[in-house]
Image: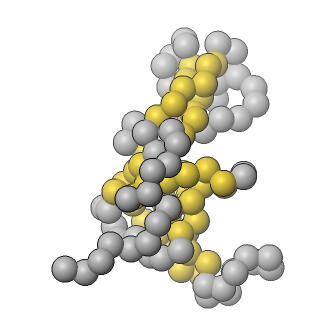
Amino acid sequence: MIPTPMLLVSRCESCHSRFLPRPGPCPRCGSSAVRPQEIPPEGRVLAATELTAPAPGFPSPHRIALVEALDGIRFLAVADYLPGLGAVVPIAREGDHYVVVGRPPEPG
């Protein structure tokens, strides 16, 4: 497996919710006591799809997966392959989006 750096999320000091980093207060309680927190760079695939006619500027086929990080945060990640449902996959942030890192597991 390819090692990836920890993922950075935001954690509210008031209500303890965690969410993807964004400007402004906590989306749950409105507190401005929001701090960065690192989480492990992997998650479980909840859904995945392959778009054969993606929006202009995206490659075809364009594969995306709904991934739940092991701490419960959910996000979309671009993938080079369609990961199986329930698979635990490594994740990395590349620029302004998340990606499933690596290749599909070898059969067998």
Q: Position of residue 17 (x, y in %)?
A: 50, 25
Residue shown at 50% from the left, 61% from the top: 100
Q: Examine the rendered structure and indicate whether residue 14 appears above or below residue 101.
A: above
Residue 74 in view here: no
Against 96, is 59 above or below? below
The figure's colour scheme reads: secondary structure
Camera-nearest residue between 55 and 3: 3
Answer left or right for 5 relative to 104: right
Q: Please report the residue visible at 51 percent of the width from the left and 30 percent of the height from the top.
A: 38
Q: Quadrant of the N terminus?
A: bottom left
> Is 40 displayed left or right of 52 in the figure?
left
The image quadrant of residue 56 is bottom right
Q: Looking at the rendering, which quadrant does residue 13 occupy?
A: top right
Looking at the rendering, in which quadrant would you find the C terminus?
bottom left
- Residue farthest along the right direction in this orientation: 56
Q: Position of residue 25 (x, y in %)?
A: 70, 22
Q: Residue at x 61, y 84 (%)?
A: 61
**In the displayed image of the protein, which residue is found farthest to the left?**
108
Q: Can you say whether 98 is above or below 82 in the image?
A: above
Horizontal arrangement in the rendering, residue 44 relative to residue 7 (left or right): left
Q: How many marks?
A: 0
User: Is 59 placed above or below 86 here?
Assistant: below
Image location (x, y in percent) of residue 67: 45, 55
Residue 94 visible somewhere in the drawing: yes
Q: Residue at x 57, y 60 (%)?
A: 99
| Pick the front one: 84 or 2 | 2
Which residue is at the front of the view, 51 or 36? 36
Near-viewer residue (108 or 89): 108
| Residue 76 drawn at (x, y percent) | 56, 57
